[in-house]
Image (tube, grey):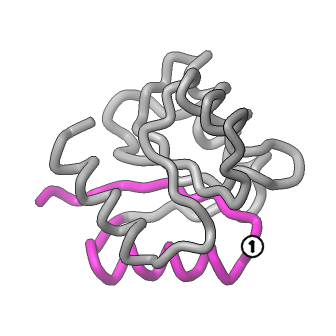
Amino acid sequence: MKNITVAVIEDDSITLELITQGLEQQLSATVYAFSRSKAAREFLLKQTAGTLDVVISDQRMPEYDGLSLLQACRSAHINIPFILLTADTTRETVMRAKELGATHFLAKPFVVEDVVNKVVAIAAKGE
């Protein structure tokens, strides 16, 4: 498998560290970890085709939530696969994420192995 490059955006430092370590240790992935959604948004909007394989973002964060980040990417024609992490699995959130083109959802709490498996599946499909 080729080296996978992932951006992880999560304002909870423990969750961010767990996901980052899981991806780095289990997949030898290159991970760009962001605890601030504003910095992540700036980074994401500078990406071009092939620079990132997957974006993993929490939904509820200060400044920009996960749906706002997804919308910013899609508006800028950045079609990187996007995994949304959320404890808020309301119908509204799910429908809006689908409209914007979220690739996958993971409900919190989740197991890091589930995140790793989603990334592997996306990389294998070349989504």
Check if residue 8 falls in the magenta segment.
Answer: yes
- Farthest-out residue, right: 62
Q: Which residue is mark 1?
A: 12
Quarter in which the N terminus is drawn = bottom left
Q: Which residues are magenta?
A: 1-29
Q: Is residue 37 above or below residue 75?
A: below
Q: Is residue 61 above or below residue 11?
A: above
The amino acid on which the numbered mark 1 sits, given as a three-letter code, is Asp
Quarter in which the C terminus is drawn = top left
Q: Residue 104 vs residue 43: left or right?
A: left
In the rendering, at what x and y percent does residue 62 appear? 88, 53
Q: Residue at x 45, y 77 (%)?
A: 112
20 or 39: nearer the eye? 20
Q: Quadrant of residue 79?
A: top left
In the rendering, at what x and y percent does residue 56 appear? 52, 53
In the rendering, at what x and y percent does residue 2 appear? 15, 56
Q: Quadrant of residue 68?
A: top right
Give the tally of numbered discs.
1
